[in-house]
């Protein structure tokens, strides 16, 4: 009889969840995996718990829910009632004698079971938000939630993270020994494009859902300067729909992953001037499609661009010169794009990420 393994997830992290789950199943086919979605299987599994979660979410985050039009479920992992329910579920369902390991994505909840090796994969920490040059106010959390997060990191067998930026926060902000923190990076969430279309040598591509946080306004300001020097330049905005109506700007909005891949294949340069970004997967995706990248050196961005080799790391006020340099030199773009593809292929694919995690998990289980 196969030993069990639990994979805890929460729906909002779905693309990464699916990729990591597939990768770990492939790496550990001898384990009987059970996937538990905290929202679907625990919170929504009980009408009473779901009601209490909505009530607590409205009490704690009502103004934010209304002002930002966020659904209450976005706040479920930060609620005391949900945290207690997860703990009770784990105690009831996870048998240490029959379970080889527990794995969870994100650190918004604690699915640990005493006596079972526990592995965590996350892209950020709560306190890492203080590490940016212009940090946003921290989202208020209930008393005890931050202690839950701190205990989760400290007691995990290994904390896998998607950037050295996040790794530094786990080590320094939460006092976790360095040997229990490992950066494995993150993979691509869109397929490689099979498009045969040629690149538009004047097209700058932006991909992101959060226009403000991803530095959209800064990019638009830089694009205006680019357009003044090169009237043929275009800016393609994919993933969000800011109200922009001016020459050269194409607002695409949300599209299927396959179509996003086509935009990577058809653009000349990728730009992501994030204000905050723990580990932007879109940078790796652009690089895998052979695009040179211009990004701000914040969060995990600096680990995904080799300045001067696979693209440029620049402050917002210096975006325009970097973009103009690349648009003016097709040979440079091709060289940087080829270097970006080689760099990303070794680090920023889910196969590579899951292989690194599996190697460490095997070593820990053997020990």
Image: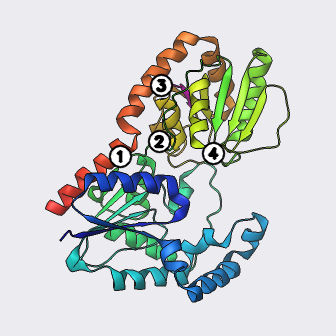
Q: Which of marks 4 and 2 is nearer the N terminus?
A: 2
Q: From the viewer's perspective, is residue 159 above or below residue 322?
A: below
Badge 2 vs badge 3, beta-carbon distance below 8 Å: no
Label 4, label 2: how far apart the Cα atoms are: 21 Å
Mark 1 residue element:
helix
Q: Position of residue 32 (x, y in %)?
A: 27, 66
**Residue labelled with disc 3:** 310
- Mark 4 or 1: in front is 1
Tell me if mark 4 has few (under 14), some (14-19) or many (20+) residues whose alpha carbon lies within 10 angstroms of its own: many
Q: Which of marks 3 and 1 is nearer the N terminus?
A: 3
Badge 3 vs badge 1, beta-carbon distance below 8 Å: no
Q: What stretch is highlighted in magenta?
A: 290-294
Label 1, label 2: how far apart the Cα atoms are: 10 Å
Q: Earlier in the sequence, mark 1 or mark 2?
A: 2
Q: Tell me which residue sits at (42%, 33%) in the image.
A: 344
The furthest residue to the left: 367
Label for residue 304? none
Label 2, label 3: how far apart the Cα atoms are: 17 Å
Q: Earlier in the sequence, mark 2 or mark 3?
A: 2
Q: Earlier in the sequence, mark 4 or mark 1?
A: 4
Verify whether residue 293 appears in magenta: yes
Q: From the viewer's perspective, is residue 183 above or below residue 4?
A: above
Q: Is residue 367 visible to us here?
A: no
Q: Is residue 48 visible to us here?
A: yes
Mark 4 residue element:
loop
- Mark 2 or 3: in front is 2
Q: Which of marks 4 and 3 is nearer the N terminus?
A: 4
Q: Where is residue 188 in the image (x, y as percent from the top left)?
A: 47, 42
């Amino acid at each position: 009889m196969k030993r069990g393994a639990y994979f805890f997830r929460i729906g909002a992290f779905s693309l990464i969840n699916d990729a990591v789950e597939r990768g770990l199943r492939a790496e550990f086919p001898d384990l009987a995996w059970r996937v538990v979605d905290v929202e679907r299987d625990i919170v929504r599994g009980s009408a009473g718990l779901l009601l209490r979660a909505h009530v607590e979410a409205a009490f704690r985050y009502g103004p934010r829910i209304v002002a930002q039009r966020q659904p209450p479920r976005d706040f479920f992992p930060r609620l005391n009632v949900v945290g207690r329910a997860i703990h009770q579920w784990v105690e009831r369902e996870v048998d240490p004698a029959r379970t080889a390991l527990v794995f969870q994505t994100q650190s918004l909840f604690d699915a640990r079971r005493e006596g079972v090796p526990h592995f965590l994969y996350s892209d950020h920490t709560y306190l890492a938000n203080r590490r940016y040059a212009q940090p946003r106010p921290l989202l208020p959390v209930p008393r005890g939630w931050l202690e839950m997060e701190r205990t989760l990191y400290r007691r995990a067998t290994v904390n896998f993270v998607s950037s050295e930026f996040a790794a530094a926060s786990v080590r320094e902000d939460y006092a976790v020994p360095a040997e229990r923190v490992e950066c494995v990076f993150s993979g691509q969430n869109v397929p490689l494009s099979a498009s045969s279309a040629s690149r538009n040598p004047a097209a700058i591509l932006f991909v992101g859902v959060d226009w403000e946080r991803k530095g959209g306004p800064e990019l638009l300001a830089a694009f205006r300067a680019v357009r003044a020097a090169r009237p043929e330049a275009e800016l393609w905005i994919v993933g969000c729909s800011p109200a922009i109506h001016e020459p050269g700007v194409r607002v695409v909005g949300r599209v299927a992953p396959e179509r996003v891949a086509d935009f990577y294949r058809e653009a000349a340069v990728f730009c992501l001037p994030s204000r905050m970004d723990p580990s932007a997967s879109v940078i790796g995706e652009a690089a895998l499609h052979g695009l040179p990248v211009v990004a701000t050196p914040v969060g995990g961005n600096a680990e995904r661009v080799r300045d001067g080799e696979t693209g440029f790391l620049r402050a917002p006020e210096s975006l325009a010169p970097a973009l103009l340099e690349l648009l003016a030199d097709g040979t440079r773009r091709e060289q940087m794009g080829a270097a970006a593809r080689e760099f990303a292929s070794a680090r920023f694919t889910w196969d590579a990420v899951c292989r690194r995690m599996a190697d460490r998990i095997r070593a820990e289980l053997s020990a």
